[in-house]
Image (spheres, rainbow, N blue to C red):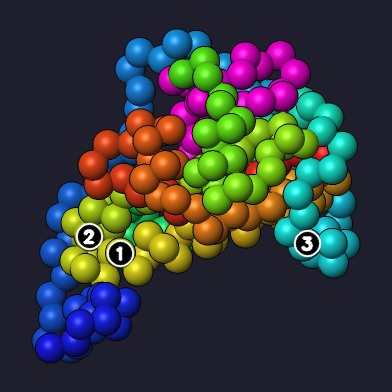
Amino acid sequence: MEKHPGKLFYRLSRLSPEDRLPLRRKPKAKVYANPLETQALPPFRQEGGAPLFRALAHLQPRLPELGAALTLKDLSQVLYPLAERGGVRGFPSAGEAYPLEAYLVVRRVEGVFPGVYHYFPKEHQLFQLSSRAEEGAWSEALMGLSLAQAAALLVLTLLPERSEALFGLRGYRYALLEAGYAAGLVLLSAVGQGLFAYPAETFYDEGVARLLRLPEGEYPGVVVILGR
């Protein structure tokens, strides 16, 4: 019996012609009923900005350097790939299960209270869950990474059971792929606006989960550090 957890996972989630997928009903997206505050984001721009290939040429992970604040318009464009438009979001999702959630830790964003927010893609809004954005605790959870110049952290989390309801164990693969799709587009959107974005994939999982108060079954996937 394979004991290596990664190899075991891939073995258990393989598909063969005789396998049947569960294909149960798609779960609904996460909604917080009683946020501290609700912050509507400006309409996202669908034209203009840097041409695609110019942005791709500058697409490299960079930590913020100036420590300047972001604007709400900056934030709206960064989150644009995650928004729901016409019933679908701006990135691929197997079976449209969307096992992805997004949280924003606001430190310096003009017109927005510092704290932890959940992003609601259907309405392109932020729901405030906590008024605390603890730089020291977040830096510790990110294994000592300096956040002194960061304006905000975007945390993409995974709920693999949404995909598992449709695809069995293979749904865990799809959840990981989806985090990659979404993070890549967020980075491209940030760089296209002249912002700095750094994907922190190495962190203490329980530390990030505790700071976001994630329930059982929801896991941190990647933390994108944003700023100027």
- Kindly identify which residue carries mark 2: 164
Q: Is residue 124 magenta?
A: yes
Amino acid type assigned to the residue bearing label 1 in the image: Tyr
Looking at the image, tell me whether mark 3 or mark 1 is earlier in sequence order: 3
Q: Secondary structure at mark 3?
A: loop
**Residue at 43% in and 33% down:** 211
The vertical placement of 154 against 184, above or below, is above
**Residue 73 shows in this picture:** no
Q: Nearer the viewer, mark 1 or mark 2?
A: 1
Is there a contact, CB below 8 Å, between mark 1 and mark 2?
A: yes
- The three-letter code of the residue at mark 2 reads Glu
- The residue range painted magenta reads 102-129
Residue wearing tag 1: 172
> Is 144 on the left-hand or right-hand side of 44?
left
Q: Where residue 204 sits: x, y (%)? A: 44, 50
**Label whose residue precedes the other's in the sequence (1 or 2):** 2
| Mark-to-mark CA distance, 1 and 2 | 7 Å
**Secondary element at tag 2:** helix
Q: Residues within 10 Å of mark 1 (few under 14, many from 20)?
A: many
Picture quadrant of residue 153? top right
